């Protein structure tokens, strides 16, 4: 057998990360897959004039190859993690770097999944709070979590912005948040914004008798993230968001070490490398890696037509957040994009349980009667579901839901 | 005119980053482009019941739209940088985030370029050394810089590894380097490796009378990069490499602030979002952003068949490193992948000047007579070019070049 091939039974699987690639080639697929193993490990596996073979310990090894379409194949490859260690940048470089995308005779390739041994996972903290921790903080144990993106998303001064969040809390939102485009900006410094939000959050808790959360976007250059986290927390804000892939997953993992509040990730940039069906890295894996890096809530593309995501993909991404994974706690899945109260019943039905979040924007903040009414329309939609009544029926006695249906339900 | 449109003459261009997108749509392209402006700025541009309009100051504005193919269009959009500031993660979130990839009725989209006002560029340091600084350090002013990837790239202990680099210096290589997959690993700790390399580098300088460089790969979690930089420099290593996009460009920008030696970037992961012709971000822009973040030498996909890069693309990427760009110094372009001495003449001819680097691996380290001979073959190839002699002719009197042609020249 070729020295870049092995059977699972021959390997100490504790020493390997298993990669699953889908690729296309015009040549013999086994030959192409062996090239792929060489390029992402040690194509030159010995020194000139020295009797040695680095393939044995350091070579990537083809475990399995199957045909899935015309000239299209799925390969499982065992990659020795001694090559990169338990470090996110070095892992990504190996499994999704030059060796993968510039392997001879492979025309298109996508990294579909990674499988880690438990001993490897143990070196990662994963989510600090996880689904249960977020539920405990909010004291919500039997329904989806209602996040929300304060809109207008950009341009508003801190005072006007905080007032909108406050109104949404009063109406029943659990966790309004900064838009992914609003972080620490000149027109709305994070320190000023979070100070107002921290105070209003406590006021809203007193007035509603409910626990409330605000999610502050601390996306910034990596040497400022911890400082912004500390400012937000000191000001009474109790969750932070990072745009995971534009900041870097490693920065998220570093923040996780000292984070005092739940970490939320936003999916910007993920589409750039995941949305082409046969190229790049799968969105599912991008989500798993965010969970590995330590995010407690993961926002990803949801089901509205704008988000171009199938039901099967969305459900797979929900599972990627929640499925058992060694010592890594579940993260709350938050499929997002153009939601309003009327999209809750079908989303809940499709997911089949309440361990998820929603993150409406205009569905709350452009409600014709304002953000408090917008938030109410979500809580009413949930109440209707609990009572087994259609939204249209429930709307007859609940004006905010009725207004939402009229505004967004065409 | 629509409020998400403007003419260049109407805007204070100092306040905007200009984006160039290519996209496909089935609907009216102007309508699609306006959606695109909304989604990446402020789709909901006012509060309910408040008389205000955030589009004026914060809205992205369509400047220009042209048809470039069937259902294919190029749009220029002015994006107010007050929305994100001079911060790389926030910039990327805006220009290549959710708003871009999930804009209604746009089926595929690629960010081709960004144009920055000089006042914006001034907030970035860019390369510390640049082409001239690297040339001064190496005392090489009239020829390409010969980098090289020590091979076997992974698995070798620090002593054997350093010996290969030393041999390559003696043969005439300027700057051997760690492979992108070899950073601070259990089997080859960076501290141990750089200690040996630092000492041998000085020895090689004494023996050859030439200035020599080693490029240590300090890719790691972002809270360890500065420490690894300091260890490498203290050990006498005089350049460092980061895998820019798996670590995050922001981490590179932060390193730049305290870096004492040239910074080199490797292109792993860039293919994942740039290689599909009509989707993601252009490789050219990815290179420009690496220059902006502060890299002095930028390695990118070169011309060998494995690298799937056209001559026009390669030349455009060389220019992206070198072209005048406000206060941002030129970075040394290093087109890489499967080079050997025989690929130098055509590369030099195509580029048309000597301001570039080459980064052979096996072409030096798998030379049949070893790395010193491999390095010699490169210097001989350059000598042949200088004398206007073909490599085959020159090889008659230069055995290392002859061996290289026999080994790699089929």
Image: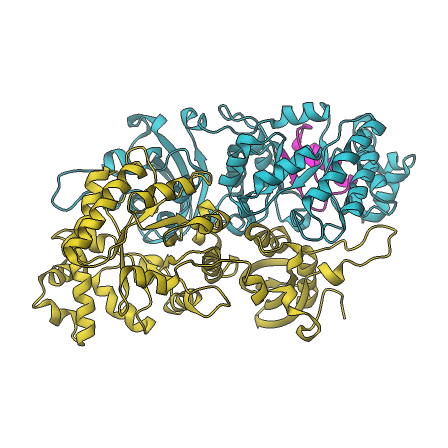
Chain colours: A yellow, B cyan
Q: Position of residue B262 (x, y in %)?
A: 63, 31
Q: Position of residue B45 (x, y in %)?
A: 22, 42
Up-down relation of residue B278 to residue B143 (above or below):
below
**Outermost left residue:** A397
Determine if the magenta segment contains residue A341: no
In front: B43, or A319?
A: A319
Q: Is residue B5 visible?
A: no
Where is the N terminus of chain B found, in terms of image quarters? top left
Across and down, in percent, residue B74 comes to 40, 42
In this rendered view, identify the residue nearer to me: A290 or B149: A290
Left or right? Give the position of A359 relative to A23.
left
Q: Is residue B356 magenta?
A: yes
Count of numbered circles in the view: 0
Q: Is residue A373 visible?
A: yes
Q: Residue at x 13, y 39 (%)?
A: B51
User: In the picture, residue A118 is in which quadrant?
Assistant: bottom right
B9 in relation to A63, above or below: above
Where residue A251 appears, as percent x and y from the top left, is 48, 47
Range drawn in magenta: B333-359
Q: Residue at x 59, y 51 (%)?
A: A90
Closer to the camera in the image, A170 or A343: A170
């Amino acid at each position: 057998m070729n020295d870049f091939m092995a059977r699972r039974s021959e390997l100490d699987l504790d020493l390997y990360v298993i990669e699953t690639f889908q690729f296309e080639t015009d040549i013999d697929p086994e030959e192409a897959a062996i090239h792929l193993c060489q390029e992402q490990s040690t194509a030159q596996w010995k020194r000139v004039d020295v009797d040695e073979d680095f393939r044995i310990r350091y070579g990537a090894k083809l475990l399995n190859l199957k045909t899935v379409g015309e000239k299209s194949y799925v390969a499982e490859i065992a990659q020795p993690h001694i090559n990169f260690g338990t470090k996110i940048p070095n892992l990504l470089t190996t499994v999704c770097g030059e060796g993968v995308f510039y392997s001879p005779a492979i025309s298109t390739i996508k990294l579909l999944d990674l499988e880690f041994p438990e001993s490897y996972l143990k070196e990662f903290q994963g989510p600090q709070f996880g689904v249960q921790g977020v539920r405990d903080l909010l004291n919500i144990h039997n329904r989806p979590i209602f996040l929300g993106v304060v809109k207008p998303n950009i341009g508003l001064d801190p005072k006007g912005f905080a007032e909108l969040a406050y109104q949404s809390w009063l109406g029943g939102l659990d966790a309004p948040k900064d838009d992914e485009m609003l972080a620490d900006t000149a027109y709305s410094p994070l320190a000023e914004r979070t100070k107002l939000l921290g105070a209003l959050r406590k006021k809203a808790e007193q007035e509603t008798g409910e626990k409330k959360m605000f999610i502050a976007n601390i996306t910034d250059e990596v040497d400022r993230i911890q400082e912004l986290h500390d400012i937000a927390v000191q000001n009474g804000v109790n969750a932070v968001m990072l745009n995971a892939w534009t900041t870097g997953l490693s920065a998220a993992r570093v923040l996780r070490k000292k984070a005092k509040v739940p970490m939320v990730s936003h999916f910007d940039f993920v589409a750039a490398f995941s949305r082409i069906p046969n190229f790049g890295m799968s969105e599912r894996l991008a989500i798993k890696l965010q969970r590995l890096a330590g995010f407690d809530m993961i926002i990803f593309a949801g089901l509205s037509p704008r988000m171009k995501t199938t039901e099967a993909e969305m459900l797979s991404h929900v599972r990627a957040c929640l499925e058992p994974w060694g010592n890594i706690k579940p993260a709350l899945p938050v499929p997002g994009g153009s939601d309003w109260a009327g999209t809750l019943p079908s989303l809940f039905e499709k997911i089949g349980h309440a361990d998820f979040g929603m993150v409406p924007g205009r569905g709350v903040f452009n409600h014709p009667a304002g953000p408090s009414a917008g938030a109410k329309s979500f809580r009413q939609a949930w109440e209707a579901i609990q009572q087994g009544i259609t939204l249209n029926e429930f709307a007859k006695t609940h004006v905010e839901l009725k207004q939402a249906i009229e505004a967004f339900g065409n």
